[in-house]
Image (tube, rainbow, N blue to C red):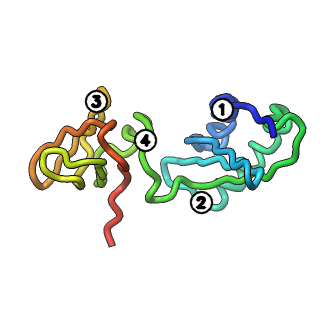
Amino acid sequence: MKIMPMKEVEAFLAPVAASVGAELLEAVWNNRDRSLTLVIDAPGGVDLDLCEAFHHAADAALDELDPTYGEAYTLNCSSPGLDRPFKDARDFARHIGEKIEVHLYAPYEGAKYYEGTLTAFEDGIVVLAAQQGEKRIPFDKTSKVCLLIEV
C-alpha cells in the first residue's frame, strides 16, 4: 500500500492540532493494521475529550489530504503515554525541570543508567542534575530517555 511520508502528514496536521489546543508529536503508520496513529500532547495533558476533538478535526482534514491515496485505513488518536521515549529537541524542551531516566547502550562515566532532573538539552547533549552531580550525556549514546515514573 502506498502512503504519503509521515513528515508531510505531520506538517499538514500541525495547525489542525493547534486549533484544538494540542500539539501533534508524531504520526505513525502501521502497515500491518493499515492504521494511522496520531500522537498528541497538550499543556494540561491529554484527556478523552481532547483526543476526540482532535480525531474529528484530523479526520476531516485527512479526507482532503488523502495520505493513503484512496485506500481505507483506521485513524487512531493517542496521548504520548508516560513512558514515551524522548525523540528530539522538542521532547526535551517540554520536560525541562522534570525528573527523567537515561538508559545507555554502554557504560558512560561508569554507569549504564542515570536518573535526575533534566536541566537542559544543548547541541545533542542531555544535561542532567543527578545525585552524583551534573551529568552531560551525549544523546547518541542513549538507548532510551523518558520521564521517570515514581511509584
Q: Is tag 1's residue or tag 2's residue first in the polypeptide sequence?
A: 1
Side (left or right) of 124 relative to 24: left
The residue carrying mark 4 is 91
Q: Nearer the viewer, residue 18 or 96?
A: 96
Outermost residue toward the right? 70
Question: Residue 86 appears at what percent x and percent y?
Answer: 42, 45
Q: What mark, if any, has residue 122 been given in the picture? A: 3
Query: Residue 94: which quarter of the image?
Result: top left
Q: Judge depth for marks 2 and 3 and give the one in front.
A: 3
For marks 3 and 4 on the same chain, the one whose residue lies earlier in the sequence = 4
Tag nearer the camera, 1 or 4 = 4
Query: Which residue is label 1 attached to?
Result: 15
Looking at the rendered structure, the kind of residue marked 2 is Asp
Q: Secondary structure at mark 2?
A: loop
Q: Mark number for residue 47?
A: 2
Q: Earlier in the sequence, mark 2 or mark 3?
A: 2
Mark 4 touches mark 2? (CB < 8 Å): no
Give the image location of residue 106, x and y in percent.
Answer: 25, 48
- Mark 4 residue crowding within 10 angstroms, few (<14) / some (14–19) / many (20+): some
- Which mark is first along the chain, 4 or 1? 1
Query: Which residue appears farthest toward the front when viewing the image?
Result: 106
Secondary element type, mark 3: strand
Instruction: Determine whether 136 is above or below 145 in the image.
Output: above
Instruction: Please state, as top left, top right, bottom left or bottom right, where the C terminus lies in the image.
Output: bottom left
Mark-to-mark CA distance, 3 and 4: 13 Å
Q: Horizontal and vertical percent for residue 69?
A: 86, 34
> Mark 1 touching mark 4, by CB under 8 A?
no
Query: Residue shown at 16%/43% (left/top)?
Result: 135
Residue at mark 1 to residue at mark 2: CA–CA distance? 19 Å
How far apart are the two marked residues, 1 and 3, measured between alpha carbons?
Answer: 27 Å
